[in-house]
Amino acid sequence: MKNIVPIILTGSFGLTLLAQGIPTPIGFATISTVALGAGVLYTIKRRSEAGLPLIPRSVLTLPVVIASLCYFALGVLSITVADDKFMCVKEMVQRILIIMLPMFVFSLVPRKPEDLKKVILQYLPVCGLIALVAVYDAHHSGFAKPAYTFGMHKNHIAGSCSVMATIAIAALLTSRDLKRRLLMLCFLGLGVVGCVASQGKAGLVCIIVATTFMLVANGAKPRNIFYFVAAVLLIGSILWKIMPQEAIEHVVSTKKFSTNEIRMSLWTDVLPVLTKDPFTAVGWGNFLVKNDRFFGDCACVLLYDWFQLTILGPIALLTVIFFAIKQGLDNARRTPKTSVLAFINLCALGIICGRFTHGMVDTFWIGRGVTLVTWAAIGMTIFVKLYLDQLALRKGAIALQRPSDSRLSYAKKPALR
C-alpha cells in the first residue's frame, strides 16, 4: 500500500500525455481522470481514518485557492443564462476534474517531496517517446508539415513537449550531478525538437516564458539571463536556416487562412462584439453565439471566458494566474536552491507560466490532459507551501529566508498533514 500514492500521482500527472480515453456522457475518461478520482477517494479515506479535516483550513486561506474557487463558482453560476443546461453541467463536471481535483490530490496526497519528484520525472520518458515518434513522423515530410502523432493534435504534442522541456530545465537549475545535467539537457533538446516537429510555435514560446520565470525565481545572475537570451537567438537562427521554407511560412505567414491570419481575424472580430456587450454571458459549455455570429474558437482563453462568463471571466482567471505565479515565487524565496522542494517548485512555476501563456495564443483547452497539468502544477505549489510551513513549525526548522548553505538536506522529514 505504501506505493499507492506514487501510482495515483503518476497516473494523474505523468499519463496526461495519453489523450485517448473511453467515451462517457460527460466526455472522454482517460487514465488521468480515473487516477484523479481514485486519488480523491483515497485521500478522503486516509484523512478520515487519521481524524484529520478533509481540507485543512490553511489550504482554504491561500489566495490562489480562493481565486480558483471564485473562478469555478462563476462558471457554475453561468448555468442560469445557459440555453443548453446539459452542456453547462457537462462542462462543470469536466472543470471539477481539471480545476478542483488536481489541486486537492496534489496538495494533500503526497507525504514526502521525493514521492512527488519521482512522479514529475516519470513524465520525461513518456513524453520523450511521443516526441521521438513525432520527429519520425515529421521526418517523412521533411519537417514541412506538422506531426499528428498517435492521433493527437499538434498543439497537444507541442504543449506536452514544452512541459517536458520545463521539467528538464528545473532539473538543470537544481542539480549538481554532471551526468544528470547532461541527461536533462538531452530531454530539453528533445522537447524543443518535438515542438519543431509538430510545428507548435506556441510550445517554443512557452519554453522561453517558463525558463525566464524559473531563472528569476532561482535568483539567476544577469549574465546567466544573458546567456539564455543568446542561446534562444542562436537556436532560432539555426532553425530559421535549416527548416523548410514551407514550415517557416507556416510560422510567419499572414496570408489568408494561415494560422496567424485566422487567429488575428478571430480576435479582431470577437473584440467589438465583446466590448459592445461585456456583461452578457452564454454559459459554460455553450456555443459562442452572439449577435447572429458564431465563434467556435477564438484561440485565447481570456476571450473564450469573456464570451461564456462576461468580462468577470477573464478577470477571475487573471487573478488565478497572478496568485499562482506569486505562490511559486514566494516558495522559491524559502527553499534551498538544490533541494527537492526547489525542483518541485520550479517545475510547477514553469508549467503554470508556460501553460497559461499557451492559453493566450492558442486553444487553451485543447487536450484536456495538457490543461489538467496546469492545475496539477498549482497543486504542487500548494504542496510546497504546506511542507515549508510544517518545516518552519518544527524546532530548528529552516528559516523563512533561503539558507546560505544550499546543500541543506531534508534528512528528517515530517509527513505532510
Image: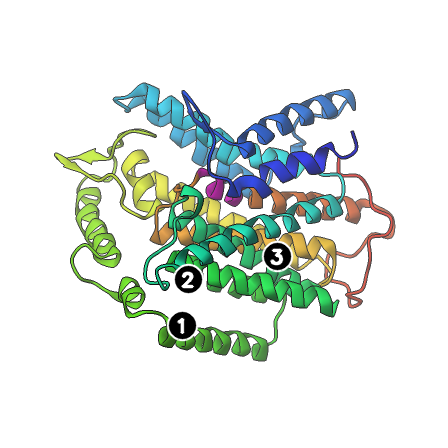
Residue labelled with disc 2? 196
Q: Give neighbour class at mark 1: few <14, some 14-19, many 20+ (Cα, 10 Å).
A: some
Residue labelled with disc 1? 239
Residue labelled with disc 3? 346
Q: Do the residues labelled 2 and 1 touch (CB within 8 Å)?
A: yes
Q: Is the magenta stretch mostly helix, strand or loop?
A: helix
Q: In which quarter of the image is residue 10?
A: top right
Q: In this view, does 192 lie to the left or right of 246?
A: right
Q: Which is closer to the viewer, label 3 or label 1?
A: 1
Disc 3 marks which amino acid?
A: Leu
Q: Is residue 268 left or right of residue 340?
A: left
Disc 2 marks which amino acid?
A: Val
> Label 2 to label 1, Cα distance in Å?
9 Å
Magenta-tinted stretch: 368-375
Q: Do the residues labelled 2 and 3 touch (CB within 8 Å)?
A: no
Tell me the quadrant of the picture where the N terminus can be found: top right
Camera-side residue of 274 and 293: 293
Camera-side residue of 293 and 150: 150
Disc 1 marks which amino acid?
A: Leu
Q: Is residue 171 left or right of residue 139?
A: right
